[in-house]
Image (cartoon, rainbow, N blue to C red):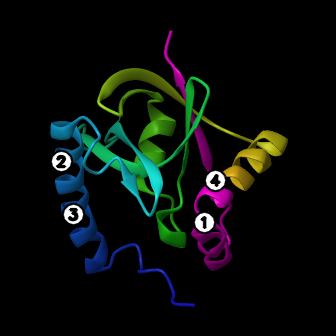
Amino acid sequence: MADAPQANSPFWWIWERATSVHSAAYKLSKGRVGGKAYGVPVVLVDSVGRKSGKRRTHPLLCDEQGENIVIVASKGGVDKHPAWYHNLKADPETRINWRGENRRVRARETEGAERQRLWDRMAEVYPTYNQYQSRTERQIPVIVLEPAA
């Protein structure tokens, strides 16, 4: 199994540019283009940089659980959490674009039995998550995006 690209490698600079194109196509087509990756649904999640103050959009694999959307902060199994995870921890109120619909949500990190149940579901949807977890000592967070009040 290949190691994940290091957190500061040029891979991530290229990855960020590709995700910008993906997000634009998703928004323009209301999710018809870019609404799936690897056969898995994609949601666009906004976060505001806790240091930069810049709003960014992140296309993330997801699973719909009733009114909630479940996402995983895997970053390909590198040893650092993705920046969007830290940003949502600092400011959990955000917006998502789900199949062309803009929604206000609140991000909540799962724990214990709930985390395990949702991790198992996400690993069923995208089995590569198990490989990502095996690459790192950090526990990869599972986040629930719940409708905001």
Q: Mark 4 to mark 3: distance in Å?
A: 23 Å
Q: Which mark is residue 129?
A: 1
- Residue drawn 54% across and 71% down? 77
First in sequence: mark 3 vs mark 1: 3
The residue to which callout 2 is attached is 25
Q: Mark 4 to mark 1: distance in Å?
A: 8 Å
Dots 4 and 3: beta carbons under 8 Å?
A: no
Q: Which mark is residue 10?
A: none
The residue to which callout 3 is attached is 18
Q: Magenta segment: does it hold 140?
A: yes
Over which residues does the magenta segment extend?
122-149
Q: Amino acid at mark 1?
A: Tyr
Residue most extreme to the bottom:
1
Front residue (pair 6, 66): 66
Q: Quadrant of residue 98?
A: top left
Dots 3 and 2: beta carbons under 8 Å?
A: no
Q: Which mark is residue 122?
A: 4
Q: Mark 3 to mark 1: distance in Å?
A: 21 Å
At numbered mark 2, what does the secondary structure look like: helix, strand or loop? Answer: helix
Q: Amino acid at mark 4?
A: Met
Dots 4 and 1: beta carbons under 8 Å?
A: yes
Q: Which quadrant: the N terminus?
A: bottom right
Q: Mark 2 to mark 4: distance in Å?
A: 25 Å
First in sequence: mark 3 vs mark 2: 3
In the figure, 130 relative to 51: above or below? below
Dots 2 and 1: beta carbons under 8 Å?
A: no
Q: Where is residue 28 drawn, in percent x and y?
A: 15, 38
In the figure, 12 relative to 140: above or below? below
